[in-house]
Amino acid sequence: MISSNRSQLTFILWTCLTTTFLGDVKPAKGEFPGTKSNFHGFDQYEFEIDGMNCRVVTPQRAVTGNPWIWRARFWGHEPQTEIGLLERGFHVSYCDVANLWGNAEALRRWDKFYAYLTLEHRLSPRPALEGMSRGGLMIYHWAIANPEKVSCIYGDAPTLGIRPYVENLQAGDPRLDRIKDWMQAHHLSLEAAQAYTRDALDRLGPLARANIPILHVCGDADESVPFEKHTAELERRYRKLGGTIEVLVKKGGKHHPHSLPDPQPIIDFIVEHQPNVALPITHGPFVGHVDSTNAHLWARFAQAGEYSLVAYATDAPLQLRATARAARKHDLCVEWQLRGLRPGTQYHYQIQSGDKKLLQGNDFFFKTAENTKPSMLRVAFGSCAYEDESSSAVWRQMRLADPHLLVLLGDTPYIDSTDLAIQRKRHATFAGVADFRRLLRNRSLYATWDDHDFGSNDTDGRLDGKENSRRAFVEYHANPSYGDGKEGIYTQFRRGGVEVFLLDTRYFAGTEPSPYDEEKSTLLGTKQWHWLRRELKTSTAPFKVLACGMIWNNAVRPGKRDHWGTYAHERKALFEFIGQEQIPGLVLVAGDIHRTRVLSHLTKESAGYRIPEFITSPIHAGVIETANTPHPGLIHDSGAPNAFLLMTINNKESPATLSAHFINKEGKTLFASTFTEFDLGKQRPSTQIQRD
């Protein structure tokens, strides 16, 4: 079994590239010299440069940018990654540095070979480096010396330093025989080896500063290169420096076998980090709204044209197809809608351009909702995220928590403009975050906005250009609906035991008198209020979640008026409506204030029960200390950065339950609470007593 402490395994088949050249990279120049042979169906060239044994394997057709992977040591062992990359247009290279253990002579050889490949044959100036076992010494020593010449690093059970092998050893210890060649290559005595600080573990700073992404594939029971002393230690140090590293752990795995039976996660990682390769799919795909018979999926493309999404169930040969056009008037964004699906069924999907498959893989799937069958559903809520490493750590932790769907509450992203070009650019930048993309390949995304993505801090519906904000939001999401189809973005969906109402607290705010007090301004607007009252009244879900960016209470930092307390007349009307219509199961969710909070509103008299409010913010690291203000219903407050809310709704048993766990990027639970439907207004069934 393979698990990841960075992200779960991702699979991608990358088979079609655009032909647009990026930068100054030109097509690969000419054939290579030396002896020509066959490498798993591809042409291999073996030759010497200044006495160095070198190999290059060429793809049948090199792709734009001439990307290549550079293997250090053990040529041909477990070649599945190289074969997969060759099929996708990469070159594969090797320069023999055996028994040099990454020393100065090894670096000199690699410098020579790099210059030959990039200058004489115009391969990409930033190859991917691959090191298995002791090959890890070579790739890290060269990368640290040349961070500007590296696109990414793939280490497979890599050896990372000599100190773990010599600590606590005395001269004459037979275990030193295993590494005597290593010590000689670096001219190290035992004492010098025990104090050596020139290995990768001690010199990661240049790689972190250059933002070099790293992937390691390791067994946690490795007897030759102990996981804790090598990869786990490097991971801790690299993260502390702000570097990006993903570790795929083979549970119980030893040093062999290397690689993975299916190398797609490795290929995926390498392809995603090539700077001079243009993919036809620039963003996504993301799964959007899914119900029992329909599914919405979204992606953005590099070029205009028609693209098809094909879905198929694993137990049925029938394929369903939807075709949509990527057009510049919609910023090349596409939303497909598949209809006629089977309830409770998992579908894999692929994306095609004509007959060419652009993307497919085991990680690209969605599952339709059960029709009426009780279920357990996990929903993640979050707000306030940047495109930084700490936010990415939350996306990775969400994947480990494995929610069925994600609901974003706004400030995702921060935009602070209604200029259409800026809106689109910021949405695209946010959607391009690698860990965010991986999270949403196989779980639904729903979203509303708050002030910063609407257009300006603490703003309302009188903001000029709000139509541009709505246009960009619709282009970059796949919600079930958007307001009344012309204005606003409010929407709703039902899954399992919960119905979620995503409110729009920006578009209509301040634009008309309130339907509940003509002397005061509205927050939701008349149209949205009519929709919300109608749908709440007819909802049969045990729990109804009302979610928005704006918090529902008025316990805020001094001077802030951007909350439901400013519109207390409409909040009061909502609570009274719940009581008058005897609507059970209401739960409030909000974000915005950069704190984690739980409150119980004093609504027993108006609504018939105390309504809970969960506030989850921020996904990024920016906590606001002054937002820790008192409230008579306050249950919990924590100034925790990098947090999200995981809500679990279980209606498989009676009474149905709703559990809330606030989790940080390390997976620590900050606070947890559970409600039954009886706690939230549902009448307990009467019991009849049988008498003899």
Image (tube, helix red, strand yellow):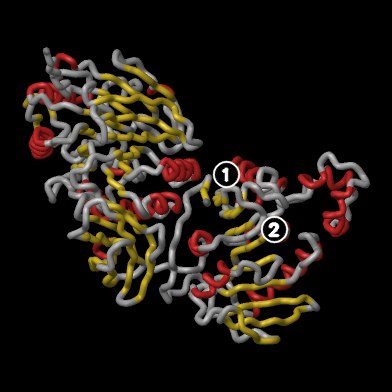
Going by the picture, which residue comes out furthest to the front? 692
| In the displayed structure image, the side of residue 492 where residue 148 appears, left or right | right
Q: Is residue 663 above or below residue 391?
A: above
Residue drawn at (35%, 22%) of the image: 557
Q: Which residue is mark 1?
A: 242
Residue 233 placement: quadrant: top right
Q: CA distance from mark 1 to mark 2?
A: 25 Å
For the question of whether residue 200 can be seen, the reply is no
Q: Is residue 160 above or below residue 639?
A: below
Q: Position of residue 194 (x, y in %)?
A: 83, 43
- Residue type highlighted by circle 1: Gly
Quadrant location of the C terminus in the rendered image = top left
How many residues crowd around disc 1 within 10 Å: few (fewer than 14), some, or many (20 or more)? some
Residue drawn at (13%, 31%) of the image: 522
Q: Secondary structure at mark 2?
A: loop
Q: Are marks 1 and 2 in contact (CB under 8 Å)?
A: no
Q: Position of residue 539 (x, y in %)?
A: 13, 36
Residue drawn at (33%, 70%) of the image: 303
Q: Nearer the viewer, residue 316 or 441?
A: 316
Q: Which residue is mark 2?
A: 133
Q: Earlier in the sequence, mark 1 or mark 2?
A: 2
- Residue type highlighted by circle 2: Ser
For the question of whether residue 441 can be seen, the reply is yes
Q: Nearer the viewer, residue 32 or 210?
A: 32
| In the displayed structure image, the side of residue 430 where residue 469 appears, left or right | left
How many residues crowd around disc 2 within 10 Å: few (fewer than 14), some, or many (20 or more)? many
Q: Secondary structure at mark 1?
A: loop
